[in-house]
């Protein structure tokens, strides 16, 4: 037996599936698993997959989850380092020993009567020196199919692993879907994720947040690279030059829209490399290079339309890769199509809500779950960059940190230098969204959009960011962006979506030294004349409001940042405290 076979065998003895099925990643197999999910397997009483109208939504299936299993559950997510300090105040912690005891009890016989799917997959291009070979076990076709879409899955990975035992391991079971018996546990030193009781994306597709961020961030800390919650795009200018950038935004703040933005500026074009995760390495040329370890898009459906994200609508209607999933959207019975709030047109007459109940517009309840999602191959995207499959990745010229802030934060600010940029990332805050189970709309600090995903003490993570900067001879410039500022009536001032290209253009102009900027207490800001605003209908005073630094708001902001930093005590890098003090001085 190979180490892989031995490991699978051990997990099967614990979980006791009816049968074990090794996935080869082929198209035929995908069809078979879908069949099986339509006819045999059920989740919360619904067939796992319902075939949608293939004329309008080719290769698409509707999935419904258990009503209590619709988002990441951060309070049930643990990072099990040998000691609590390594996990830090930003993670829930129990000892690896205790976690394993708890999970073993819950996993004993959890796959009884079910099939165990063995999923060999790569995170990253198989020929990339940055890629990782992984294997996940799961007992639901929903996860097997989702992993096929989201990763490069197949037999060749099993061959690649061969006799090695250093592959990344994931054990997943939907268990009985009872939140009382739901745990997502990580063992960073063992490259192992053990998750039970949820079928939801970030809790169950273990290559995604669990491995590619929480565990990979720890690998990066030890090996000198970064695993980040970032979009990767190429911005082509009218001359045909492409500038690559990454952007970190919290879940459900528009990363997918940014990743395939349809430019409103003539001659500009955005090329997609990734919409969620970036692995960043220092190249031999002293630049920062990015790869997207994933191969699919797991985006929020509500709000997606021909108007807000035409390229995504095209992606969802493309026939290329089999299949595409829609999870917890509403369902148009007459057309046999998915539906969600914000899609084009008026609500269909005969609509079922995300739980399959008749929907009545009068009751004021949303038909699609606010965190309903599509899972679709990135190869379907008409905006896919030619560089997507380049094993080396792309060289990064700018890093953007953003969040959802209705007040306080300007549209765009450039950091003074790398250290100041790390400070800028570390102090980023955002209003909470429906992507995780918690109160929605409260501002919380979410440094680098990594708060739920940094697999070790965030103070050490900041230190690591500072160290990376010291090794880069040509570091990217760092910016903060905020599309979400509102006026006194509470309306968004900036139109966002395709118009964000105007902000990206300024950023590209800055990294290519084409424009000057204005120095302020919090960083460099654009001279309004350098922002391409032709065709936009925003009054000058509104534009000024987008860049306003309100001293009362900022006093509160600095106190809040200080409170957050204090959670990390002495471990917090002194450079960032010094940056905070300098900012306070400048704002006086
Ligand atoms: O965690 S997921 O990857 O499922 C989605 C998100 O919250 O970013
Ligand atoms: Mn995400």
Image (cartoon, rainbow, N blue to C red):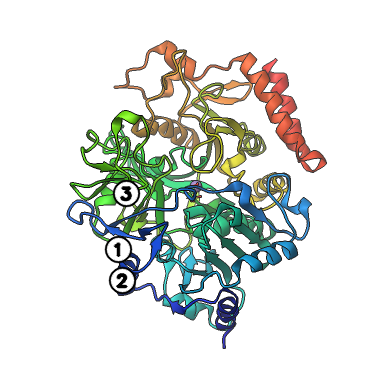
At which x and y percent is residue 28?
A: 29, 74
Classify mark 2 as within 8 Å of ligand 1 or not, answering yes or no: no
Between the residue at mark 1 and the residue at mark 2, the CA separation in whole angstroms equals 7 Å
At which x and y percent is residue 445?
A: 63, 35
Local packing at callout 2 (Cα closer than 10 Å; few below 14, some 14-19, many 20+) is few
Is residue 532 depicted above or below 76 in this figure?
above
At which x and y percent is residue 431?
A: 54, 32
Q: What is the quadrant of the C terminus in the image?
A: top right
Asked whether the beta carbons under mark 1 and mark 2 sit within 8 Å of each other, the answer is: yes
Q: Secondary structure at mark 1?
A: loop
Which comes sooner in the sequence, label 2 or label 3? 2
In the current view of this chain or complex, which residue is farthest to the bottom? 1
Which comes sooner in the sequence, label 1 or label 2? 2
Task: Name the quadrant containing residue 165.
Answer: bottom right
The residue carrying mark 2 is 27
The residue carrying mark 1 is 322
Which comes sooner in the sequence, label 1 or label 3? 1
The residue carrying mark 3 is 383
Asked whether the beta carbons under mark 1 and mark 3 sit within 8 Å of each other, the answer is: no
Q: What residue do we see at 50% from left, 24% from top?
A: 406
């Amino acid at each position: 037996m190979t180490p892989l076979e031995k490991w699978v065998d051990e997990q099967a003895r614990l979980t006791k599936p009816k049968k074990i099925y090794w996935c080869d990643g082929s198209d035929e197999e995908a069809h078979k698993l879908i069949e099986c999910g339509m006819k045999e397997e059920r989740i919360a009483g619904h067939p796992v997959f319902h075939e949608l109208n293939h004329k309008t939504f080719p290769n698409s299936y509707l999935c419904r989850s258990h009503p209590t299993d619709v988002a990441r559950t951060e309070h049930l997510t643990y990072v099990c380092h040998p000691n609590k300090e390594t996990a830090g105040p930003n993670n829930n912690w129990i000892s690896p020993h205790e976690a394993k005891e708890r999970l073993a009890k819950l996993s004993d016989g959890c796959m009884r009567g079910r099939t165990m799917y063995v999923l060999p997959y790569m995170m990253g291009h198989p020929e990339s020196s940055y890629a990782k070979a992984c294997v996940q076990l799961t007992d639901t076709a929903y996860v097997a199919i989702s992993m096929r879409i989201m990763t490069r899955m197949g037999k060749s990975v099993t061959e690649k692993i061969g006799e090695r035992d250093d592959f990344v391991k994931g054990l997943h079971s939907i268990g009985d879907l009872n939140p009382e018996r739901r745990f997502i546990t990580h063992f960073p030193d063992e490259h192992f994720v053990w998750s039970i009781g949820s079928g939801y994306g970030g809790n169950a597709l273990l290559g995604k947040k669990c491995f590619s961020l929480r565990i990979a961030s720890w690998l990066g800390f030890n090996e000198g690279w970064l695993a980040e919650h970032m979009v990767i795009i190429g911005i082509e200018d009218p001359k045909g030059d492409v500038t690559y950038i990454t952007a970190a935004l919290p879940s459900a703040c528009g990363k997918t829209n940014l990743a395939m933005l349809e430019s409103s500026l003539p001659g500009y074009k955005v090329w997609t490399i990734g919409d969620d995760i970036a692995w960043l390495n220092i190249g031999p040329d002293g630049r920062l290079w990015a790869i997207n370890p994933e191969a699919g898009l797991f985006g929020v459906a509500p709000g997606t339309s021909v108007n807000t994200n035409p390229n995504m609508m095209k992606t969802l209607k493309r026939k290329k890769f089999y299949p595409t999933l829609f999870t917890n959207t509403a369902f148009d019975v007459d057309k046999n199509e998915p539906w969600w709030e914000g899609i084009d047109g008026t609500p269909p007459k005969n609509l079922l809500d995300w739980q399959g109940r008749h929907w009545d517009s009068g009751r004021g309840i949303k038909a699609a779950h606010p965190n309903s999602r599509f899972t679709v191959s990135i190869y379907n995207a008409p905006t896919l960059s030619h560089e997507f499959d380049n094993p080396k990745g792309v060289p990064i010229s700018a890093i953007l940190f953003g969040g959802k802030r209705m007040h306080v934060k300007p549209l765009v600010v450039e950091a003074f230098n790398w250290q100041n940029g790390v400070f800028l990332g570390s102090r980023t805050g955002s209003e909470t969204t429906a992507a995780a189970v918690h109160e929605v709309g409260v501002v919380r600090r979410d440094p680098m959009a990594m708060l739920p995903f940094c697999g070790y003490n965030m103070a050490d993570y900041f230190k690591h960011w500072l160290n990376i900067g010291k090794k880069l001879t040509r570091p990217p410039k760092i910016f903060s962006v905020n599309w979400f500022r509102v006026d006194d009536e509470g309306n968004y001032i900036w139109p966002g979506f395709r118009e964000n290209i105007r902000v990206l253009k300024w950023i590209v102009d800055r990294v290519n030294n084409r424009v000057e900027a204005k120095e302020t207490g919090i960083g460099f800001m654009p001279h309004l004349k350098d922002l391409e605003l032709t065709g936009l209908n925003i009054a000058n005073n509104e534009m000024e409001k987008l860049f306003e630094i309100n001293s009362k708001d900022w006093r509160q902001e600095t106190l809040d940042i200080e409170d957050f930093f204090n959670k990390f005590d002495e471990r917090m890098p002194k450079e960032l405290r010094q940056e905070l003090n300098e900012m306070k001085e400048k704002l006086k």
